[in-house]
Image (cartoon, rainbow, N blue to C red):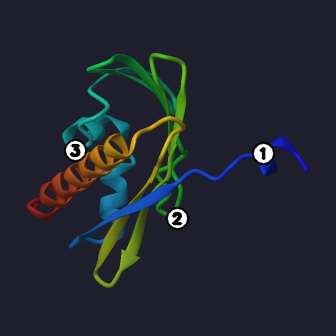
Amino acid sequence: MGCDMMRKAAQAQVISVHIARDWREVYAFTSDPAAFPEWASGLGRPLGHDDAIWRFEGSEGATTVRFSAPNEYGVLDHFVLLPDGNEIYIPLRVIANGSGCDVQFTLFRVPGMTDEKFAADAQWVERDLRKLKALLEKRD
């Protein structure tokens, strides 16, 4: 077995919000990394980018984010490289659901994370997704 097959699975929590907008409209907005500061409070302000690799200035310093390529499947996965050198994989999806859509964020518990920190991160993601919902549902 390869090394990847031997790693222990991380605890994960899927956090979802329903948005009363067509999934393509939600995807178009959320697939633009420049729009992330409008709803994703953790990244901070954009500093610049080179194709799919963006730099943001956050509360803990500069963060580099690699975004998935635009696609027709609603996949918004990205990898966040933290100032301490750790990289976090963030699966994010926009899924058609009736005349609206669901935005699903998978939060992985990183090694050494306490129960309290994992719960706080989940609440943070929930707040950001509610902000995204409010932002997009009030648009004309």
- Is there CB contact under 8 Å for labels 1 and 3? no
What whole-number distance in Å separates the C-alpha atoms at marks 3 and 2?
21 Å
On residue 73, the disc is 2
Question: Residue most toward the right?
Answer: 1
Q: Which residue is drawn at the image coordinates 46% and 23% (left, top)?
A: 82
- Quarter of the image for residue 100 reads bottom left
| Residue for badge 3 | 39
Pair 1/3: label in front: 1
Q: Residues within 10 Å of mark 3 (few under 14, many from 20)?
A: some
Q: Earlier in the sequence, mark 3 or mark 2?
A: 3
Instruction: Look at the picture and state if 53 lies above or below 24.
Output: above
Pair 1/2: label in front: 1
The secondary structure type at the circle numbered 1 is: helix
- Quarter of the image for residue 63 reads top left
Residue 35 image offset from top left, x and y in percent: 27, 40
Q: Earlier in the sequence, mark 1 or mark 2?
A: 1
On residue 4, the disc is 1
The mark total stands at: 3
Residue 115 image offset from top left, x and y in percent: 37, 46
Residue 10 image offset from top left, x and y in percent: 57, 50
